[in-house]
Image (cartoon, helix red, strand yellow):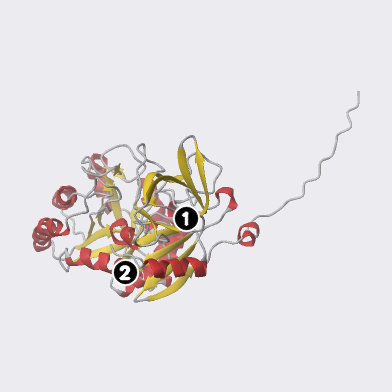
Amino acid sequence: MKINNSAIQSIAKEYGTPSYIYDGDQLVKNYKNLVNALPNFVDVFYALKVNPNVSLVRLLRNHGACTEVCSITEMEIALKAGATPEDIIYLGPCKKDYELKRAISLNIFAIVVESEIELERVSSFAKDLGVVANVAIRINPDFSAEGSPWKMGGRPTHFGIEEQHAIQYFREYLNTPNVNVKGIHVYNGTNILEASSVYENTKYILGLYDKIVQMYNCKFTMVDVGGGMGVPYFNNQKELDIEEFKALMVPLFSKFNQKYPDTRIIMESGRFIAGTAGYLAVTVNNIKVNHGKTFLVTDGGTNCHSAAAGSGRVVKRNFPMQNISAPKDSTNRVVYQVSGPLCSPDDIIGRNMELKEAKVSDVLLVAFSGAYGPSSSPGLFHSHGFPSEVLMYQNKSYLIRESDTTLDIMNKQIMVDVQHHDELILN
């Protein structure tokens, strides 16, 4: 992927670091690559969880993306970005009452219910509102997605209803008052790089849909096969073969569509769309040698990019990184430990990184950072706050989130001046 180093250095100088910089052209390209690898009757729903910035959602929406949300705030962002209720689905294992009521009142395409208790709550709220709520039943399948480092189905999780239990009690779901069960949702795993794994996973879900329809002689209008297509963060990984993906998925979906032409097929994608379209820019603040290792101490670390620091991974591996301030013709490379600003031994965003020789004030760029950057990082660690976000699109740059200031953080806090009174103890 080509990077305009001078443009990024200008952005870093104008807006400061740490900052997230998004390549809008790459974002749109990734979305279109996925859409073009699927039949036109399959709808791609962008998962806001990976990056909910309203400007990015708006850009994708302008090119036809639908939206998958997991909180009321993500739902409001989607609406602000131009999504219609018909193109919103709402997931999540802990939807609060006011969130469900808002989703029901908006008449979004589907509330994906994760339990029978949640289905009962939706039914009750819909009755109170005098409407019928659209839902899909999330099933935790017996099948486990191969090729996924983070499996979300086929094992004990807090997601969905067990497959055999759901099949046994589906008639009760269909008979729930004030509820329209539109179909099923299954999300088995994430960051899958093998097309065959996505295919097998999808084939199983479509077969499960067919099984329930035949068993209960019901008419569904939706199936959400999840997605989970990934990004090759590390040196030993290869990107998803989009041509193989297309060759496998088009016949599979086409056969299903011939049998169920009135069923809306949904495929979710977040990481595949946004992952390679973002970068974290950090500035070298200090250079030091400690126990034989050379450290580049930067102004952005785990607090800005927990994924690059390896949070949640047993084996810590490096995201692609480069020193964009070094001269282009520089051949002197040094092995560095790249750390952040936190008083934490885990605040390392690059281990044994071979980079062009760096000096204080150089800007380093962490690539493949468009997904799960600010959205999954502890931005308030040490009260540093969240970084600024900038969109580059068609040779222009736009500030799409201001960095947190000290006042931004302090103004959310409420100081209670509790007086201490010594008690007089009488013997």
In the rendered image, residue 173, in percent from the top left (x then y), is placed at: 29, 50
Secondary structure under badge 1?
helix
In the rendered image, residue 8, in percent from the top left (x then y), is placed at: 41, 67
- For the residues labelled 2 and 1, the Cα–Cα distance comes to 21 Å
* Type of amino acid at the residue the image marks with label 2: Glu
In the rendered image, residue 326, in percent from the top left (x then y), is placed at: 41, 59
For label 2, the residue is 86
In the rendered image, residue 265, in percent from the top left (x then y), is placed at: 20, 61
For label 1, the residue is 97
Q: Would you say 345 lies left or right of 112 here?
A: right
Q: Is residue 235 above or below residue 222?
A: above
Determine if residue 130 is in view. Answer: no
- Res. 36 mark: none
Farthest residue, direction top:
427
Say which of 356 and 150 sits in front: 356
Say which of marks 2 and 1 sits in front: 2
Q: Is residue 41 above or below residue 188?
A: below
Say which of 5 and 375 sits in front: 5
| Number of numbered callouts drawn | 2
Label 2 or label 1, whichever comes before in sequence order: 2
